[in-house]
Amino acid sequence: MSDVVELAQELIRRRSVTPDDAGCQALLAARLARAGFRCTALPFGEVENLWATHGGDGPVLVFLGHTDVVPSGPESAWASPPFEPVVRDGRLYGRGAADMKGSVAAMCVALEDFVARHAHHAGSVALLLTSDEEGIAEHGVRRVAQHFRESGQRIDWCVVGEPSSRERLGDLIRIGRRGSLTGTLRVRGVQGHVAYPEKARNPIHQAAPALAELAAMRWDAGNLAFPPTSFQISNLNAGTGADNVIPGTLQAVFNFRHGTASTPEELRARLESVLRRHGLDYQIDWRQSGTPFLTQDGPLRRAVCAVLQQQLGIKPELSTGGGTSDGRFIAPLGAEVVELGPLNASIHKVDEHIALDELERLPGLFSAIAERLLVTP
Ligand SMILES: [Zn+2]
């Protein structure tokens, strides 16, 4: 069995349910230290983060990943236990196989191989790992990026190994991500008896037409880089449970996924103008959990596309879709960020898996990207 498959299995065996690292980073740090990397633990709160770097002055290429996984759900629903990796029908099964212990193992093997062949490469190459990507992501890469900003650590290029591919390894890479803006809306009414509506004010009746208008709104048309902004109401609560009481309040939670065609300020202002026009007595708590970023055509994008063309014969789709990732914290440091990883069909599901031929291809892709950026021919 190849090195990358064995390492992925060792990682899956560690029950690192977010934000627990369960010894994954220590295992990887020991290997990378043997290969000549300087390894620094950057713990914040209960979260483990690892920064392993090799080289000196010049451009900095970082491979970014996470060692935590989402819970398995009922283990009895799995064909084999989620934390006991098994190979079946050419696939490696286990929680985290695709998201993203396979990629993390591949990055480690790629880096060992790269520095063994190019001890005197330009700039530096690094691995950054966190154990808080799947959870609230407060003390993970968000905090590490803040630390880097304060300590002056630059990052020029960042390859995120999140599972990006759709049907075939490398058919889609992410070159940006949308921003995420969440609002919690509280509408105040006046509670009363349903038989005496003139003595009450029903927040459901007041809010419903406003919410209907918001749900039907077209916020922008998107642009070349991003699809149109989407607006979704995710939670709606009102009522006491009794059928003869007009409730006193209504609460709704909604989320915008937006590109660069609208700013968060514009979206907030437009939404609130609708609420005011409907005469609502309301209050909103806003939370921006990520701002949009976009990596333009540059050295990193060109390197990734050239490697995929050369090794897999693929011209990848350049996408800004999907959810958020830790790339959102690295991009504001001025880094070009590209996400390239295995198929995402089974992530977070029962019987999560990665195809062995994909997993065994990944180290070669990652090390070839490093060669294009840090080795002058
Ligand atoms: Zn992930």
Image (cartoon, rainbow, N blue to C red):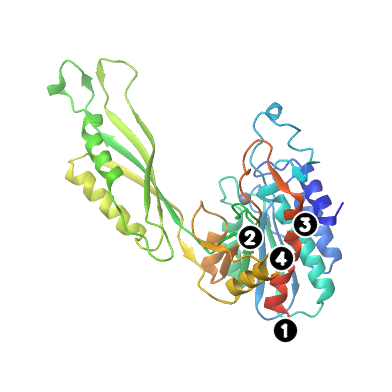
Q: Dot 4: what SS?
A: helix
Would you say 63 lies left or right of 89 here?
Answer: left
CB within 8 Å, label 2 to label 4 = yes
Task: Give the total of numbered labels.
Answer: 4
- Residue at mark 3: 360
Q: Position of residue 4 (x, y in %)?
A: 80, 55
The amino acid type found where label 2 is placed reads: Gly
The residue pinned by badge 1 equals: 376
Label 3 Cα neighbours within 10 Å, binned few <14 / some 14-19 / many ≥20: some
Closer to the observer: label 1 or label 4?
4
Q: Amino acid at mark 3?
A: Glu
Mark 4 crowd level (few <14, some 14–19, many ≥20, 10 Å Cα): many
Q: Which residue is mark 4?
A: 365
Please, what is the three-letter code of the amino acid marked with disc 4? Answer: Leu
For marks 3 and 1, give the one nearer the viewer.
3
- The residue labelled by disc 2 is 170
Answer yes or no: do the residues labelled 1 and 4 have beta carbons within 8 Å?
A: no
Of the two numbered discs 2 and 3 on the same chain, state the one appearing first in sequence: 2
Cβ of mark 4 under 8 Å from ligand 1: the answer is: no
Q: Label 1's element?
A: loop
Q: Is mark 1 within 8 Å of ligand 1?
A: no
Q: For marks 2 and 3, give the CA distance.
A: 13 Å
Quadrant position of the C terminus in the picture: bottom right
Up the image or down, 171 lies above or below 73; here it is below
Q: Are marks 2 and 1 in contact (CB under 8 Å)?
A: no
Q: Nearer the viewer, mark 2 or mark 4?
A: 2
Tell me how far mark 4 sits from mark 3, CA to CA.
10 Å
